[in-house]
Amino acid sequence: MGLGQRVLMVDLDPQACLTFSFGHNPDRLERSVHEVLTDDLRPQEAIVTTDEGIDLLPATIDLAGSEAMLLMRPGREFTLKRALSSLLADYDTIIVDCPPSLGVLTLNGLTAAQSVLVPLQCETLAHRGVGQLLRTVKEVQQITNPDLVLLGAVHTLYDARTTHSRDVLADVSDRYDLPVLWPPIPRTVRFAEASASGATVLAGRKNKGAQAYQDLATNLAKYWAGSELVTFTPAAES
């Protein structure tokens, strides 16, 4: 990623979109995070490499059955945290991509994490679940992970040319008192093209979407190194 970071991505979504986007076919993987969570497989045995130089703990459709299996376990919310503990010395940053539902898998991700980013599309309907998510984060902070920090929202599909995008962004910021990280991720056809080809948006030609994600990564890296987190004010774009 150009920042000198050793990064691991953990795909915790049964749809395995992250896994596919990093060039791995979930249907052809013999080991995944599912076996790590349910069969006590060492995560090192399931990690795969990517063309971007980022390691990946992939997902498969089998992960859809992990929720039911985890429900029968005591301390089920801590399963992922225990599994990742052996990897902490190997990586500077571990990013967990949680599913959109607020089930046991998401609770595992939040319990294992040190901080939370909330990706939100700049569409009105995309924000209907924000309140419930924030309540879940608060409950996790109270019960399983008191050190969890809510960093703020990352807005995607942002179009500075439209008042709708700016209004939706401002509404979320005001209604939930949720900081919006800089920069918002712009709407671009490059994301659809990357998804269709099973590659990340960083591959191929330079584009504004890739640059925005690189700027966001730099913002976060500087914050974790001790600098102030840069946030975004929609009024400044008006």
Image (cartoon, rainbow, N blue to C red):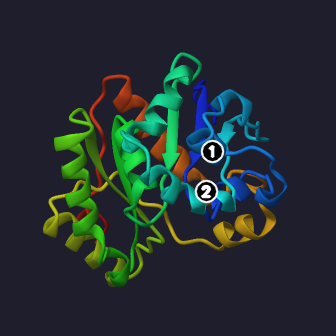
Whether residue 91 is visible to the viewer of this picture, yes or no, is: yes
What amino acid is labelled 1 in the image? Answer: Val
Q: Residue at x 58, y 44 (%)?
A: 38
Up-down relation of residue 68 to residue 88 (above or below): below
Whether residue 182 is visible to the viewer of this picture, yes or no, is: no
Name the quadrant of the N terminus.
top right
Name the quadrant of the C terminus.
bottom left
Q: Residue 126: x and y, percent?
A: 38, 77
Which residue is farthest top? 89
Q: The residue tagged with tag 2: helix, strand or loop? A: helix
Q: Give the residue number, with chain letter if any, for mark 1.
A: 33
Q: The residue tagged with tag 1: helix, strand or loop? A: helix
Q: Is residue 99 left or right of residue 14?
A: left
Q: Give the residue number, with chain letter if any, for mark 2.
A: 63
Q: Quadrant of residue 183?
A: bottom left
Q: Residue 175: x and y, percent?
A: 14, 69
* Separation of marks 1 and 2 at Cα, in angstroms: 7 Å
Q: Residue 215: x and y, percent?
A: 49, 45
Q: Residue at x 35, y 83 (%)?
A: 125
What amino acid is labelled 2 in the image? Answer: Leu
Q: How many marks?
A: 2
